[in-house]
Image (cartoon, grey):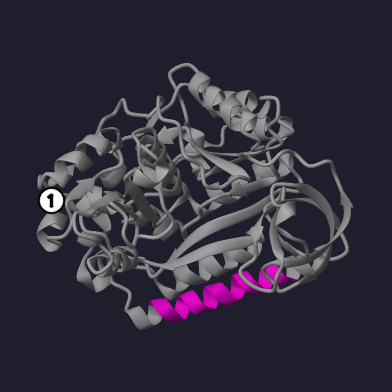
Amino acid sequence: MTASQRPTVYIETYGCQMNVSDTELMLGKLTASGYEAVAQPDGADVILINTCAIREHAEQRVMGRIGEMKSRMSRGTVLGVTGCMAQRLGAELLDRAKHVSLVIGPDGYRDLPSLIESAREGVRAAATEFDLEEHYEDFTARRFDGVKAWIPVQRGCDYRCTYCIVPTTRGPERSRKLAEVVRETEAVVASGISEIVLLGQTVNSYFDGAHDFADLLRAVGSVEGVRRLRFTSPHPNDFSDRVIRAIAETTTVCEHVHLPMQSGSTRTLKRMLRRYTREGYLECVDRLRSAVPDLSLTTDIIVGFPGETEADFSETLSMVEAVGFDDAYTFKFSPRDGTPATRFPASDSVPDEIASERLARLIATVRARTRERNLELLGQRREVLVEKPARRGGLLQSKTRDFKVVMIPGDASLIGRYLNVELTGTTGSTFLGQVVHQRTPLPLAV
Protein backbone atom coordinates (compact mmCIF):
# COMPACT_ATOMS: atom_id res chain seq x y z
CA MET A 1 0.00 0.00 0.00
CA THR A 2 1.41 3.40 -0.94
CA ALA A 3 1.36 6.41 1.37
CA SER A 4 -1.43 7.95 -0.70
CA GLN A 5 -3.63 4.89 -0.01
CA ARG A 6 -3.22 5.09 3.74
CA PRO A 7 -6.19 6.45 5.72
CA THR A 8 -5.66 10.03 6.80
CA VAL A 9 -6.10 11.67 10.20
CA TYR A 10 -6.37 15.32 11.19
CA ILE A 11 -6.16 16.42 14.85
CA GLU A 12 -7.06 19.92 16.04
CA THR A 13 -5.83 20.85 19.51
CA TYR A 14 -7.23 23.25 22.09
CA GLY A 15 -5.96 24.09 25.57
CA CYS A 16 -2.78 23.56 27.54
CA GLN A 17 0.59 21.98 26.82
CA MET A 18 -0.67 18.67 28.20
CA ASN A 19 -3.23 18.60 25.40
CA VAL A 20 -0.49 19.33 22.87
CA SER A 21 1.47 16.39 24.28
CA ASP A 22 -1.61 14.15 24.15
CA THR A 23 -2.12 15.09 20.50
CA GLU A 24 1.45 14.03 19.79
CA LEU A 25 0.78 10.71 21.53
CA MET A 26 -2.41 10.13 19.51
CA LEU A 27 -0.66 10.98 16.25
CA GLY A 28 2.15 8.59 17.17
CA LYS A 29 -0.29 5.79 17.91
CA LEU A 30 -2.28 6.32 14.73
CA THR A 31 0.69 6.72 12.37
CA ALA A 32 2.14 3.51 13.86
CA SER A 33 -1.23 1.90 13.04
CA GLY A 34 -1.04 2.90 9.37
CA TYR A 35 -2.57 6.37 9.28
CA GLU A 36 -1.12 9.39 7.55
CA ALA A 37 -1.32 12.74 9.36
CA VAL A 38 -2.68 15.64 7.31
CA ALA A 39 -2.70 19.38 7.98
CA GLN A 40 -6.33 20.14 7.03
CA PRO A 41 -9.64 18.47 7.96
CA ASP A 42 -11.16 18.60 4.47
CA GLY A 43 -11.37 15.07 3.10
CA ALA A 44 -9.63 13.43 6.07
CA ASP A 45 -10.78 9.91 6.91
CA VAL A 46 -10.57 10.68 10.64
CA ILE A 47 -11.00 14.08 12.31
CA LEU A 48 -10.24 14.39 16.02
CA ILE A 49 -10.82 17.53 18.07
CA ASN A 50 -8.67 17.44 21.22
CA THR A 51 -10.44 19.63 23.73
CA CYS A 52 -10.07 21.77 26.83
CA ALA A 53 -12.64 22.19 29.62
CA ILE A 54 -10.89 24.67 31.90
CA ARG A 55 -13.17 27.59 30.97
CA GLU A 56 -16.67 27.84 29.56
CA HIS A 57 -15.49 29.93 26.61
CA ALA A 58 -13.14 27.12 25.53
CA GLU A 59 -16.03 24.64 25.45
CA GLN A 60 -18.23 27.06 23.50
CA ARG A 61 -15.50 27.44 20.89
CA VAL A 62 -15.16 23.68 20.59
CA MET A 63 -18.91 23.14 20.22
CA GLY A 64 -18.93 25.71 17.45
CA ARG A 65 -16.02 23.96 15.78
CA ILE A 66 -17.73 20.58 16.04
CA GLY A 67 -20.68 22.08 14.18
CA GLU A 68 -18.41 23.54 11.50
CA MET A 69 -16.75 20.17 10.93
CA LYS A 70 -20.00 18.68 9.64
CA SER A 71 -19.51 20.55 6.35
CA ARG A 72 -15.82 19.56 6.16
CA MET A 73 -16.46 15.83 6.46
CA SER A 74 -16.49 13.46 3.52
CA ARG A 75 -18.76 10.46 3.25
CA GLY A 76 -17.48 7.92 5.76
CA THR A 77 -15.39 10.38 7.77
CA VAL A 78 -15.13 9.52 11.47
CA LEU A 79 -15.36 12.57 13.75
CA GLY A 80 -14.15 12.15 17.33
CA VAL A 81 -13.87 14.45 20.34
CA THR A 82 -11.02 13.74 22.74
CA GLY A 83 -9.49 15.34 25.83
CA CYS A 84 -10.91 17.10 28.89
CA MET A 85 -14.21 18.28 27.44
CA ALA A 86 -14.83 14.75 26.15
CA GLN A 87 -14.13 13.40 29.63
CA ARG A 88 -16.44 15.94 31.27
CA LEU A 89 -19.43 15.53 28.95
CA GLY A 90 -19.02 11.91 27.92
CA ALA A 91 -21.93 10.35 26.02
CA GLU A 92 -23.82 13.65 26.26
CA LEU A 93 -21.67 14.82 23.34
CA LEU A 94 -22.98 11.96 21.22
CA ASP A 95 -26.52 13.18 21.90
CA ARG A 96 -25.71 16.84 21.24
CA ALA A 97 -23.87 16.23 17.95
CA LYS A 98 -25.17 13.29 15.93
CA HIS A 99 -22.26 13.50 13.46
CA VAL A 100 -19.78 12.76 16.28
CA SER A 101 -18.92 9.06 16.45
CA LEU A 102 -16.32 8.94 19.24
CA VAL A 103 -15.87 10.61 22.62
CA ILE A 104 -12.58 9.65 24.26
CA GLY A 105 -11.12 10.91 27.55
CA PRO A 106 -7.38 11.40 28.24
CA ASP A 107 -6.91 7.82 29.49
CA GLY A 108 -8.58 6.17 26.47
CA TYR A 109 -6.10 6.77 23.65
CA ARG A 110 -4.70 3.24 23.70
CA ASP A 111 -7.93 1.96 22.13
CA LEU A 112 -8.11 4.74 19.53
CA PRO A 113 -7.39 2.58 16.43
CA SER A 114 -9.96 -0.07 17.36
CA LEU A 115 -12.58 2.53 18.32
CA ILE A 116 -12.10 4.23 14.96
CA GLU A 117 -12.54 0.94 13.12
CA SER A 118 -15.75 0.25 15.06
CA ALA A 119 -16.97 3.75 14.23
CA ARG A 120 -16.47 2.98 10.53
CA GLU A 121 -18.97 0.17 11.01
CA GLY A 122 -21.46 2.52 12.63
CA VAL A 123 -20.66 1.90 16.30
CA ARG A 124 -20.67 5.15 18.25
CA ALA A 125 -18.86 5.05 21.59
CA ALA A 126 -17.82 7.07 24.63
CA ALA A 127 -14.62 5.90 26.37
CA THR A 128 -14.18 7.95 29.52
CA GLU A 129 -13.01 5.54 32.19
CA PHE A 130 -9.98 6.58 34.24
CA ASP A 131 -6.96 4.26 34.12
CA LEU A 132 -4.65 5.05 37.02
CA GLU A 133 -1.86 2.94 35.50
CA GLU A 134 -1.90 4.55 32.07
CA HIS A 135 1.17 6.58 31.09
CA TYR A 136 1.41 5.47 27.42
CA GLU A 137 5.00 4.30 27.99
CA ASP A 138 5.00 2.19 24.82
CA PHE A 139 3.74 5.05 22.61
CA THR A 140 6.18 6.97 20.41
CA ALA A 141 4.97 10.55 20.18
CA ARG A 142 4.72 12.13 16.73
CA ARG A 143 6.26 15.47 17.68
CA PHE A 144 5.40 18.44 15.53
CA ASP A 145 7.66 20.91 17.33
CA GLY A 146 11.21 20.18 16.21
CA VAL A 147 12.73 22.62 18.70
CA LYS A 148 11.40 21.57 22.11
CA ALA A 149 9.81 18.40 23.45
CA TRP A 150 6.87 18.25 25.86
CA ILE A 151 7.36 15.25 28.16
CA PRO A 152 4.52 14.40 30.58
CA VAL A 153 5.87 13.16 33.92
CA GLN A 154 2.60 13.21 35.86
CA ARG A 155 -1.09 12.90 35.05
CA GLY A 156 -4.06 14.06 37.10
CA CYS A 157 -4.21 16.23 40.22
CA ASP A 158 -4.82 15.65 43.95
CA TYR A 159 -5.40 19.31 44.77
CA ARG A 160 -9.04 20.33 44.88
CA CYS A 161 -9.06 24.03 44.05
CA THR A 162 -12.70 25.06 44.17
CA TYR A 163 -12.71 26.59 40.68
CA CYS A 164 -10.86 23.81 38.84
CA ILE A 165 -12.32 21.02 36.71
CA VAL A 166 -8.99 19.21 36.16
CA PRO A 167 -9.40 16.57 38.92
CA THR A 168 -12.72 15.65 37.29
CA THR A 169 -11.36 15.49 33.74
CA ARG A 170 -7.93 13.98 34.39
CA GLY A 171 -8.40 12.05 37.61
CA PRO A 172 -6.09 11.66 40.62
CA GLU A 173 -2.39 12.37 40.49
CA ARG A 174 0.01 9.65 39.38
CA SER A 175 3.65 9.92 38.31
CA ARG A 176 5.73 8.10 35.73
CA LYS A 177 8.82 6.18 36.79
CA LEU A 178 11.94 8.32 36.65
CA ALA A 179 13.74 5.79 34.45
CA GLU A 180 10.98 6.02 31.84
CA VAL A 181 11.19 9.81 31.73
CA VAL A 182 14.97 9.59 31.30
CA ARG A 183 14.53 7.01 28.54
CA GLU A 184 12.15 9.27 26.65
CA THR A 185 14.47 12.24 27.14
CA GLU A 186 17.38 10.27 25.67
CA ALA A 187 15.27 9.37 22.64
CA VAL A 188 14.23 12.99 22.17
CA VAL A 189 17.83 14.21 22.34
CA ALA A 190 18.87 11.54 19.84
CA SER A 191 16.31 13.03 17.42
CA GLY A 192 18.08 16.41 17.62
CA ILE A 193 15.90 18.26 20.17
CA SER A 194 17.78 19.87 23.03
CA GLU A 195 15.06 21.70 25.01
CA ILE A 196 12.91 19.56 27.30
CA VAL A 197 9.72 20.70 29.04
CA LEU A 198 8.49 18.45 31.87
CA LEU A 199 4.69 18.51 32.18
CA GLY A 200 2.35 17.90 35.08
CA GLN A 201 -0.76 19.46 36.58
CA THR A 202 1.30 20.16 39.72
CA VAL A 203 4.59 19.02 38.30
CA ASN A 204 6.77 19.66 41.35
CA SER A 205 4.68 17.28 43.46
CA TYR A 206 6.08 14.49 41.26
CA PHE A 207 6.83 11.28 43.21
CA ASP A 208 7.19 7.88 41.61
CA GLY A 209 7.40 5.96 44.87
CA ALA A 210 11.17 6.35 45.17
CA HIS A 211 12.13 9.66 43.53
CA ASP A 212 10.85 13.20 43.98
CA PHE A 213 10.93 16.18 41.62
CA ALA A 214 14.44 17.15 42.72
CA ASP A 215 15.69 13.72 41.67
CA LEU A 216 13.85 14.04 38.36
CA LEU A 217 15.32 17.46 37.58
CA ARG A 218 18.86 16.26 38.27
CA ALA A 219 18.41 13.04 36.27
CA VAL A 220 16.82 14.63 33.19
CA GLY A 221 19.05 17.69 33.38
CA SER A 222 22.18 15.53 33.26
CA VAL A 223 21.17 13.59 30.11
CA GLU A 224 23.86 14.26 27.53
CA GLY A 225 22.56 16.59 24.85
CA VAL A 226 19.96 18.36 27.00
CA ARG A 227 20.75 22.06 26.81
CA ARG A 228 17.62 23.58 28.33
CA LEU A 229 15.25 22.05 30.87
CA ARG A 230 11.92 23.66 31.79
CA PHE A 231 8.85 22.50 33.71
CA THR A 232 5.20 23.53 34.02
CA SER A 233 3.07 24.04 36.00
CA PRO A 234 4.25 23.83 39.61
CA HIS A 235 2.31 24.53 42.80
CA PRO A 236 3.74 27.00 45.34
CA ASN A 237 3.29 24.47 48.17
CA ASP A 238 5.56 21.87 46.57
CA PHE A 239 8.82 23.82 46.31
CA SER A 240 10.75 21.92 48.95
CA ASP A 241 14.32 22.92 49.81
CA ARG A 242 15.47 19.85 47.84
CA VAL A 243 13.60 20.98 44.74
CA ILE A 244 14.88 24.54 44.96
CA ARG A 245 18.47 23.31 45.37
CA ALA A 246 18.05 21.10 42.32
CA ILE A 247 16.81 24.06 40.29
CA ALA A 248 19.78 26.17 41.38
CA GLU A 249 22.43 23.46 40.98
CA THR A 250 21.30 21.81 37.71
CA THR A 251 22.88 24.01 35.06
CA THR A 252 20.48 22.95 32.32
CA VAL A 253 17.41 24.12 34.30
CA CYS A 254 16.38 27.49 32.88
CA GLU A 255 16.11 30.61 35.00
CA HIS A 256 12.33 30.79 34.77
CA VAL A 257 9.48 29.51 36.92
CA HIS A 258 5.80 29.81 36.07
CA LEU A 259 4.34 30.15 39.57
CA PRO A 260 0.51 30.30 39.56
CA MET A 261 -0.73 32.82 42.14
CA GLN A 262 -4.46 33.10 41.24
CA SER A 263 -5.08 35.86 43.82
CA GLY A 264 -3.12 38.16 46.09
CA SER A 265 -5.79 38.04 48.81
CA THR A 266 -5.48 35.44 51.56
CA ARG A 267 -9.24 35.55 52.00
CA THR A 268 -9.83 34.72 48.33
CA LEU A 269 -7.06 32.11 48.28
CA LYS A 270 -8.80 30.34 51.16
CA ARG A 271 -12.09 30.31 49.26
CA MET A 272 -10.21 28.96 46.24
CA LEU A 273 -8.71 26.23 48.47
CA ARG A 274 -5.23 27.06 47.18
CA ARG A 275 -3.70 25.98 50.52
CA TYR A 276 -1.31 28.90 50.89
CA THR A 277 -1.64 32.48 52.06
CA ARG A 278 -0.44 35.73 50.53
CA GLU A 279 2.50 35.61 52.90
CA GLY A 280 3.23 31.98 52.04
CA TYR A 281 3.34 32.78 48.34
CA LEU A 282 5.72 35.69 48.92
CA GLU A 283 7.92 33.42 51.04
CA CYS A 284 8.08 30.93 48.16
CA VAL A 285 9.08 33.75 45.79
CA ASP A 286 11.82 34.86 48.19
CA ARG A 287 13.21 31.33 48.53
CA LEU A 288 13.30 30.85 44.76
CA ARG A 289 14.96 34.20 44.10
CA SER A 290 17.49 33.68 46.88
CA ALA A 291 18.57 30.45 45.18
CA VAL A 292 18.37 31.81 41.61
CA PRO A 293 18.95 35.59 41.75
CA ASP A 294 18.20 36.22 38.04
CA LEU A 295 15.01 34.17 38.09
CA SER A 296 12.17 35.24 35.81
CA LEU A 297 8.68 34.69 37.24
CA THR A 298 5.40 34.43 35.37
CA THR A 299 2.02 33.59 36.85
CA ASP A 300 -1.73 32.93 36.46
CA ILE A 301 -4.30 35.26 38.03
CA ILE A 302 -8.10 34.98 38.26
CA VAL A 303 -10.33 38.01 38.87
CA GLY A 304 -14.00 38.05 39.76
CA PHE A 305 -13.90 34.90 41.90
CA PRO A 306 -17.13 34.57 43.93
CA GLY A 307 -16.99 36.84 46.95
CA GLU A 308 -14.01 38.86 45.70
CA THR A 309 -14.32 42.40 47.03
CA GLU A 310 -12.61 45.53 45.80
CA ALA A 311 -10.28 45.20 48.80
CA ASP A 312 -9.41 41.63 47.76
CA PHE A 313 -8.72 42.77 44.22
CA SER A 314 -6.54 45.63 45.49
CA GLU A 315 -4.43 43.03 47.29
CA THR A 316 -3.98 41.22 43.97
CA LEU A 317 -2.79 44.44 42.32
CA SER A 318 -0.39 45.15 45.17
CA MET A 319 0.93 41.57 44.96
CA VAL A 320 1.69 42.04 41.27
CA GLU A 321 3.68 45.15 42.16
CA ALA A 322 5.42 43.46 45.10
CA VAL A 323 6.53 40.35 43.19
CA GLY A 324 7.39 42.09 39.92
CA PHE A 325 6.25 39.33 37.57
CA ASP A 326 7.79 39.27 34.12
CA ASP A 327 4.38 38.40 32.68
CA ALA A 328 1.01 37.05 33.76
CA TYR A 329 -1.83 35.09 32.19
CA THR A 330 -5.01 36.76 33.42
CA PHE A 331 -8.58 35.48 33.37
CA LYS A 332 -12.06 36.24 34.56
CA PHE A 333 -13.53 33.52 36.77
CA SER A 334 -15.40 30.92 34.72
CA PRO A 335 -17.79 28.65 36.67
CA ARG A 336 -17.54 24.98 35.73
CA ASP A 337 -20.32 22.53 36.50
CA GLY A 338 -19.31 20.10 39.21
CA THR A 339 -16.76 22.33 40.92
CA PRO A 340 -17.32 23.56 44.49
CA ALA A 341 -17.19 27.21 43.39
CA THR A 342 -20.55 26.80 41.67
CA ARG A 343 -22.12 26.07 45.07
CA PHE A 344 -21.25 29.43 46.59
CA PRO A 345 -24.33 31.60 47.24
CA ALA A 346 -25.56 33.53 44.22
CA SER A 347 -25.07 36.70 46.22
CA ASP A 348 -21.29 36.04 46.08
CA SER A 349 -21.21 36.29 42.28
CA VAL A 350 -19.22 39.22 40.94
CA PRO A 351 -21.14 41.00 38.14
CA ASP A 352 -19.51 40.58 34.76
CA GLU A 353 -19.06 44.32 34.24
CA ILE A 354 -17.13 44.56 37.52
CA ALA A 355 -15.01 41.51 36.70
CA SER A 356 -14.26 42.91 33.24
CA GLU A 357 -13.24 46.27 34.69
CA ARG A 358 -10.95 44.55 37.21
CA LEU A 359 -9.42 42.42 34.49
CA ALA A 360 -8.64 45.54 32.46
CA ARG A 361 -6.96 47.18 35.46
CA LEU A 362 -4.99 44.02 36.19
CA ILE A 363 -3.77 43.72 32.59
CA ALA A 364 -2.71 47.38 32.60
CA THR A 365 -0.76 46.85 35.85
CA VAL A 366 0.96 43.71 34.56
CA ARG A 367 1.86 45.31 31.23
CA ALA A 368 3.26 48.44 32.88
CA ARG A 369 5.50 46.33 35.13
CA THR A 370 6.60 44.14 32.23
CA ARG A 371 7.45 47.12 30.05
CA GLU A 372 9.38 48.79 32.87
CA ARG A 373 11.41 45.64 33.46
CA ASN A 374 12.02 45.03 29.75
CA LEU A 375 13.25 48.57 29.13
CA GLU A 376 15.92 47.95 31.77
CA LEU A 377 17.18 44.96 29.77
CA LEU A 378 17.80 46.80 26.48
CA GLY A 379 21.40 46.56 25.37
CA GLN A 380 22.01 43.25 27.13
CA ARG A 381 23.19 40.20 25.22
CA ARG A 382 21.38 36.90 25.62
CA GLU A 383 21.48 33.40 24.21
CA VAL A 384 18.27 32.56 22.36
CA LEU A 385 16.87 29.40 20.83
CA VAL A 386 15.15 30.13 17.52
CA GLU A 387 11.70 28.51 17.64
CA LYS A 388 9.60 29.41 14.59
CA PRO A 389 8.66 32.12 12.11
CA ALA A 390 6.95 35.09 13.73
CA ARG A 391 3.33 35.70 12.77
CA ARG A 392 4.20 38.87 10.92
CA GLY A 393 7.05 41.12 9.91
CA GLY A 394 9.18 38.46 8.26
CA LEU A 395 11.02 37.83 11.54
CA LEU A 396 11.81 34.72 13.56
CA GLN A 397 10.58 34.10 17.10
CA SER A 398 13.21 33.01 19.60
CA LYS A 399 13.35 32.65 23.36
CA THR A 400 15.93 33.31 26.05
CA ARG A 401 16.64 30.92 28.91
CA ASP A 402 14.56 33.16 31.20
CA PHE A 403 11.56 32.94 28.85
CA LYS A 404 11.81 36.31 27.09
CA VAL A 405 10.46 36.30 23.53
CA VAL A 406 12.88 37.93 21.07
CA MET A 407 12.08 38.64 17.43
CA ILE A 408 15.12 38.51 15.18
CA PRO A 409 15.79 38.80 11.44
CA GLY A 410 16.66 35.65 9.52
CA ASP A 411 15.31 32.79 7.46
CA ALA A 412 13.93 29.39 8.39
CA SER A 413 17.38 27.79 8.28
CA LEU A 414 18.00 29.31 11.73
CA ILE A 415 15.09 27.49 13.40
CA GLY A 416 16.40 25.12 16.07
CA ARG A 417 19.68 26.97 16.48
CA TYR A 418 21.17 28.81 19.43
CA LEU A 419 22.31 32.36 18.77
CA ASN A 420 23.65 35.25 20.79
CA VAL A 421 21.60 38.40 20.31
CA GLU A 422 21.60 41.93 21.59
CA LEU A 423 18.24 43.20 22.86
CA THR A 424 17.74 46.32 20.76
CA GLY A 425 14.07 47.20 21.30
CA THR A 426 10.89 46.17 23.07
CA THR A 427 7.18 46.38 22.34
CA GLY A 428 6.61 46.14 26.08
CA SER A 429 5.95 42.40 26.12
CA THR A 430 8.46 41.12 23.56
CA PHE A 431 11.89 42.16 22.36
CA LEU A 432 13.56 42.92 19.08
CA GLY A 433 17.06 41.53 18.81
CA GLN A 434 20.10 41.63 16.57
CA VAL A 435 22.32 38.58 16.12
CA VAL A 436 25.84 39.30 17.35
CA HIS A 437 27.37 35.83 17.29
CA GLN A 438 26.26 32.47 16.00
CA ARG A 439 27.25 29.35 17.85
CA THR A 440 27.67 25.97 16.21
CA PRO A 441 24.09 24.81 15.60
CA LEU A 442 22.68 21.62 16.97
CA PRO A 443 21.14 19.40 14.28
CA LEU A 444 17.47 19.97 13.61
CA ALA A 445 15.00 17.27 14.59
CA VAL A 446 14.04 15.02 11.75
| Helix, strand or loop at mark 1 | loop
Up the image or down, 4 lies above or below 114; here it is: below
Magenta-drawn stretch, dominant element (helix, strand or loop): helix
Q: Few, some or many C-alpha atoms within 10 Å of disc 1 (few <14, some 14-19, many ≥20)? A: some
On the question of residue 275 being in view, the answer is: no
Judged from this view, the residue extending furthest toward the front is 1
Judged from this view, the residue extending furthest toward the top is 210
Rendering coords of residue 288 (x, y %): 66, 42
Q: In the image, which residues are magenta?
A: 355-371
Up the image or down, 206 lies above or below 365; here it is: above
- Nearer-the-camera pick, 258 or 405: 405
Q: Which residue is painted at 65% across and 65% down in the image?
A: 390
In this picture, residue 26 sits left or right of residue 394 = left
- Nearer-the-camera pick, 436 or 57: 436
Up the image or down, 62 lies above or below 368; here it is: above
Q: Which residue is painted at 16% across and 51% down in the image?
A: 101
* Quarter of image, res 397: bottom right
Amino acid at circle 1? Ala
In this picture, residue 272 sits left or right of residue 205 = left
In this picture, residue 37 sits left or right of residue 231 = left
- Nearer-the-camera pick, 282 or 103: 103
Q: Which residue is painted at 32% across and 28% down in the image?
A: 134
On the question of residue 385 being in view, the answer is: yes
Rendering coords of residue 231 (x, y %): 57, 41
Q: Which residue is painted at 72% across and 38% down in the image?
A: 443
Residue 362 falls within the magenta-colored stretch: yes
Q: Which residue is mark 1?
A: 91
